[in-house]
Structures are given as structure tokens and as C-alpha cells.
């Protein structure tokens, strides 16, 4: 019923134009993380996240900071 004479798989029928290729890749660019400076310790952290250095979020201590001992 089906002939398997060719070991080659499916191939594109036409060349993909530069415009079509670029439109497909339009959303593939990487985005930069938005870093903000912590108001209490000055370290940079992701916005809307708890500061890993001092454990504060929006001016309040949420988690205890790790003591170096």
C-alpha cells in the first residue's frame, strides 16, 4: 500500500522567505530581568520579590536573614 523506497523524511515544498522567517522569530528575543535596588540593604533583586540578602519586602521583614556563622 505505502512505498518506503526513500530514506529521506518530509522536506519543505518551498523556500521560506526572509520576511516569513523573521515574523516567526519576532517573539524569540530574550528579555532582561528588571532589577531594583533594595531600600533597606542596597542589594539588587527582582522587582515584586523578597530580597534574598535581608529578607524584606515593601519595607517589612518577611523572612529572617541568614546569619553567617
Image (cartoon, grey):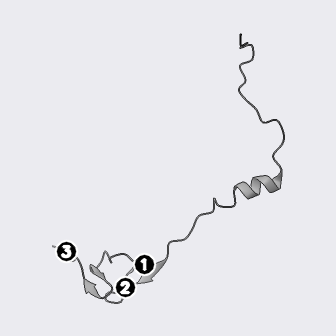
- In percent of the image, x 27 and y 78: which residue is there? 55
Q: Residue furthest left?
A: 69
Are the residues flagged by discs 3 and 2 in contact, CB closer than 8 Å? Answer: no
Q: Is residue 66 left or right of residue 19?
A: left
Q: What element carries label 1?
A: loop
Compare residues 16 and 42 and report the one nearer the observer.
16
Q: Is residue 50 left or right of residue 2?
A: left
Give the quadrant of residue 58.
Answer: bottom left
- In percent of the image, x 71 and y 19: which residue is there? 7
Residue 68: mark in rendering: 3
Q: Earlier in the sequence, mark 1 or mark 3?
A: 1
In this rendering, which labeled residue sits more in front, label 2 or label 1? 1
Q: Earlier in the sequence, mark 2 or mark 1?
A: 2
| Residue 69 coordinates in the image, percent (x, y) | 15, 73
Count neighbours of disc 3 (C-alpha within 10 A) and say few if under 14, some if 14 to 19, many if 20 or more: few
8 in relation to 18, above or below:
above
Q: Mark 1 points at which residue?
A: 47
Calculate the distance from the C-alpha at mark 3 to the C-alpha at mark 2. 20 Å
Q: What element carries label 2?
A: loop
In this rendering, which labeled residue sits more in front, label 1 or label 3? 1
Q: Is residue 25 left or right of residue 68?
A: right
Q: Which of marks 3 and 2 is nearer the N terminus?
A: 2
Calculate the distance from the C-alpha at mark 2 to the C-alpha at mark 1. 9 Å
- In percent of the image, x 65 and y 61: which residue is there? 27
Q: Name the residue under label 2.
A: 38
Q: Residue furthest top?
A: 1
- The quadrant of the image that shows the N terminus is top right
- In percent of the image, x 63 and y 59: which residue is there? 28
| Residue 24 coordinates in the image, percent (x, y) | 71, 54
Q: Which residue lies furthest to the front in this view?
A: 1
Count neighbours of disc 2 (C-alpha within 10 A) and say few if under 14, some if 14 to 19, many if 20 or more: many
Amino acid at each position: 500500500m505505502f512505498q518506503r523506497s526513500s530514506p529521506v523524511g518530509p522536506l519543505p515544498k518551498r523556500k521560506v522567505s526572509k520576511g516569513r522567517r523573521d515574523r516567526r522569530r519576532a517573539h524569540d528575543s530574550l528579555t532582561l530581568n528588571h532589577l531594583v535596588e533594595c531600600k533597606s540593604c542596597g542589594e539588587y533583586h527582582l522587582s515584586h520579590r523578597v530580597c534574598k540578602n535581608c529578607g524584606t519586602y515593601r519595607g517589612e521583614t518577611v523572612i529572617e536573614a541568614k546569619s553567617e556563622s
